[in-house]
Structure formats: structure tokens, C-alpha cells
Image (tube, rainbow, N blue to C red):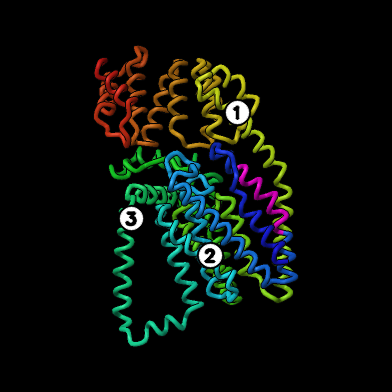
Amino acid sequence: MFLSVCAATIWLLSSAFFLADVSIGQNLAEQWLRVAMRGAVASIVVGLGLWLHSQSTRTAVTVSVSVVAIAECILAFLQTINICSSNHDLFKITGTFYNPGPLAGFLAMALPVALGAYIETHNKWLRFVFGAAAFLIVCILPSTASRTAYIAAAISCGVVFFFLKRDVFRKWTVGINRKMVYGASAIILLGGGIALWHINADSASGRLLIWKIAALGIIEEPIKGYGSFMPTYAELQEQYFAQGGTEAERWVAGVPDCAFNEYINIAFVHGIPMALGLIAISIATIWLGIRNRRIGEVGAIVSIAIFAFASYPFKIPVIVATSIIIMLLCIHSNRRVTKFIVTLALLTISAFLMLSVPNLEKEVSKQTEYAKARIYYVSKSYSAVAALYPKIALNNDAQFLYEWGHALHKEQKYAASDSVLCEAQKISGDPMILNIRGKNLQSLGKYAEAEQMFLKSANRLPNRVYPYFLLYKLYSEPAFYNDAKRQAAADSVLHKKPKTESEAIEEMREIVRKSK
């Protein structure tokens, strides 16, 4: 039973391995498909294992998580020394994930599992596996530069040590002035927090801005939520900067596709009751895990719960699959009622995954067609794009819709382009959609509507120069000429400091200088 559960779990958790180097959308779609297909089988195997031999199954799962973590660490190390390539052009280390963030989240969750199992297990071979996993994670985790993962790993390991090595804690604290310990701990935590903040202050400030604007949105719609994040958030950010906002906030503003905080994200999309439900489930799972002495698993839940405060772990298929299995291990006990509930949950998950496979296969098929057709967009063969993209009809993918609309714009099919981009705007907050829509409307002679699009773009992402250049060109149109607005737009192009200087921005400035 041990080997069956171990093989099934490793098979499930290795879903991210051996994927083709393709776009993030296709990577995630294929990962979800693999998790669905493998998870349907693995859920049944794990369920049978928990019913027939729960301790053996628990060991098999912890071994599986540790083995996959070891594989991720080895791959990450090979990426750091340039033997293997990463999955993202901007990052040297990603493991099998698309960027270092999800890799850090997975390793931070696996660390307390390996640590707890290492402390509890007496089998020397198993201790070697768990010790190797914990050691490699500690070595690789700093390379991910994920501050949230550092905190999650440290606190979760502290939880494991506290419950499994309580006698050691007591020996350490004998004869020690507790007030001094608490004071020193507070200073260390404060200093560590400040140091972590300054590792990438702009990133941290950007996330605070996201949480602030998302929180304002949640206040407006606290019960039902908005149903989606990106387009609604983009509108709220646009309104926020139209009414003010500080220069520091304008500098760090971006257009995120999630809140980088799962609790805020769920409250924003589905309402506060759903977010509170998630928190209640997490607390109940931790409480049951402590009662059932599943301390390593409790540490993993604590880790992912902390990581969820500043990242997006619930969007990563392998992390979701690992979290569900670990949560069920925490809940499981030798009582027949508990066994029945956990087994029923696994069978329900298996049935749900089986039913989701056909839709996921269609999605992956469309993404594969899109990846092939996208070659024409990259090579600027816009007529081919205009002919091929309608046949794919990947209408839930904002990038696909943007490229289709942009190609139609380049083919001077302005009305058709605007129609496609209008659909893209419903699922995306990308200001480039507004820019191209504005250019379409300007070409169609709808100047007032074009102006609104460019202004929306400028307010949505106020650290960009391009919308002001488009406004300058719009106000230069003889049919819509406005000298005061034209001069204001020109000043913005010439004097606004962009986040990244580029040749394109210098070209815009040169055009404005010559035509002033």
C-alpha cells in the first residue's frame, strides 16, 4: 500500500515536470489538465490507503512531497549554474514553475512536512530522504528572493519545533529572563521586517497599493464580490488616480491579474463570506491536525496560509493539489466517521476532476492552436492573424483577444478591431487595449470617444508616457484641435519620468519636439 500511495502521489505532484517551454497560459492549462487526470486516480488510491492503512499512507504522502521537493531543488540548482534553463526570461531560477514565487511557495510548504517527518521518523532511510529534502530547501529557498516564503517557512518550522520539541524549548528558557527574550525577539523581527521590505521596496509598495484599492472595492461590494478581479480592479485604480493618489503610488502602480493576497482576492471576487469561510476551514484544519498529532502537516498548512497573504498559491495547480492532500491528512483519524468523511471527500474530488477533463482538454487544444498561430503575430503577419484567430475563438484569453484586435487594427479594420478589443476589455485591465481602442475610434472620426479611452489609459497606469503621446496626436487633429490640451499632453510626454526609459519613448519625445 505504501508503494502504491507513494507512486500515485509523486505522479500527481510531478504534474509540472517535462512541460514544453510555452506561454504561461498554456503551461497552466496543461498543468491543470495533468492534475485533473492524475488527481482523479491518485485521490482514489490515497482514499483506499487511508481506509486500509492510514499510518503507511501518511508516510507515503510525506515521502512523496519530500521527493518532489528534492527534484525541484536539484532542477533549481542546475538552473543557477546554467545547466538547465528557467521557464522565464527575467528569472534565472524557477524550478518547474513559471517564476520563482510559486517555486518558493511550494518549497516553503514542503519544508515543515520534511522537518516534522524527520523528527518523528526513526527509520534511517526515511530520515535520510526527509533530511535531504529539508537541507536542500533551506539551501535553495533564499535564491527565490521571496520574502513571504522566508517568513512562511520560518514560522511554520517554528510551529513544528514547538510541538515536537517542546522539551527543548523548555530547557532553553530555564533561567532566562523572558522579558529580555521577548524584547530581543521583537527587535529581531522588526529589523528583519525592515530588511525584507528593502530587498525590493517598490514591489512591496506596489502590493500595498493593490491591497488598498482592492479593499476600497470590497467595501463597495462586501457580500457578492465582483465575479472577476482584473477588469474591475483596473477600473477602480483608474478612478482612484483620476481623483488623486500620491506620486509614490503613481510610480509603483501596475495592472495585476490578482490581488497578491488570496484572502483579499477571494473577498474581492466572491465576497467577504467566502473569504471568512476559507479562513475558518484553515483554522479548523490546523486545530484538527494538532489534535491528531499531524504536526508536519499542520506546519505546511500554516506555511501556505501565511504565503497566501502576499502571493497567489491557489492559482498554482501543484500547490492546490498538495494543499488538499495535506489538509485531508490533518483531518483524518482512526475514527470510522472521520475515515468515511475523508474518503467521501476524496471520491468527490476524483469525480469532479474526471468531469473537468473534457473541458480542460478542449482548452489545451485551443491553447496549442493559438501557440502555433501566434508565430504569425510575432512575425507581424497581421493578415494571417486576422484569418487564423477567428477559427481558434479562444474568447476567454485576454492576450489572444488583444493580439487579434491589434492585428485587425494594423489591417485598418477599425470597427472589427474595436469589437474584439471591447470583449478583451471585459476580462482584462491592460491599458494597451484602451490605447488601441482609442486609435480605432480616432481613425473612425469618433474623437470624443477616443479621448475618453486615452484618458482612461493614462489614469489606469499613470507612470506610462504612451497615452499622453496618443492624446497629443489626437489634439493635433484639425477636426479636434485643442491647443491648451495639446500643450499639456506635450509637457507630459517631454517631462514625465517613466519607470523604464526606452528608445520608443525617446522617439515619441523627438516627434513632439519637432512638431511643437
* Residue 284 shows in the view: no
* Residue 271 shows in the view: yes
Q: Magenta segment, which residues?
A: 29-43
Q: Could you tell me the amino acid type at mark 2? A: Ala
Circle 3 sits in a helix, a strand or a loop, which is it? helix
10 Å crowding of disc 1: few (<14), some (14-19), many (20+): few
Task: Pinpoint residue 465: horizontal percent, then vertical percent.
Answer: 33, 30
The circle drawn on residue 197 is 3
Q: Label 3 to label 2, Cα distance in Å?
A: 24 Å
Which residue is under mark 1?
A: 372
Q: Label 1 to label 2, Cα distance in Å?
A: 40 Å
Q: Could you tell me the amino acid type at mark 1? A: Lys
Q: Is 153 contained in the magenta span?
A: no
Task: Pinpoint residue 93: horizontal percent, then vertical percent.
Answer: 45, 47
At a point 63% along the width and 69% down the height, the residue shown is 59
At a point 59% along the width and 58% down the height, the residue shown is 322
Q: Is 36 contained in the magenta span?
A: yes
Task: Pinpoint residue 484: horizontal percent, then vertical percent.
Answer: 26, 22
Q: Label 1 to label 3, Cα distance in Å?
A: 42 Å
Placement of 284 over or under 202, stated as above or below? below
Which residue is under mark 2?
A: 300
10 Å crowding of disc 2: few (<14), some (14-19), many (20+): many
Task: Pinpoint residue 137: horizontal percent, then vertical percent.
Answer: 48, 60
Circle 2 sits in a helix, a strand or a loop, which is it? helix
Q: Are marks 1 and 3 in contact (CB under 8 Å)?
A: no
Circle 1 sits in a helix, a strand or a loop, which is it? helix
Which of the two residues, 155 or 250, is positioned nearer the viewer here? 155
Quarter of the figure that contains the N terminus = bottom right
Quarter of the figure that contains the C terminus = top left
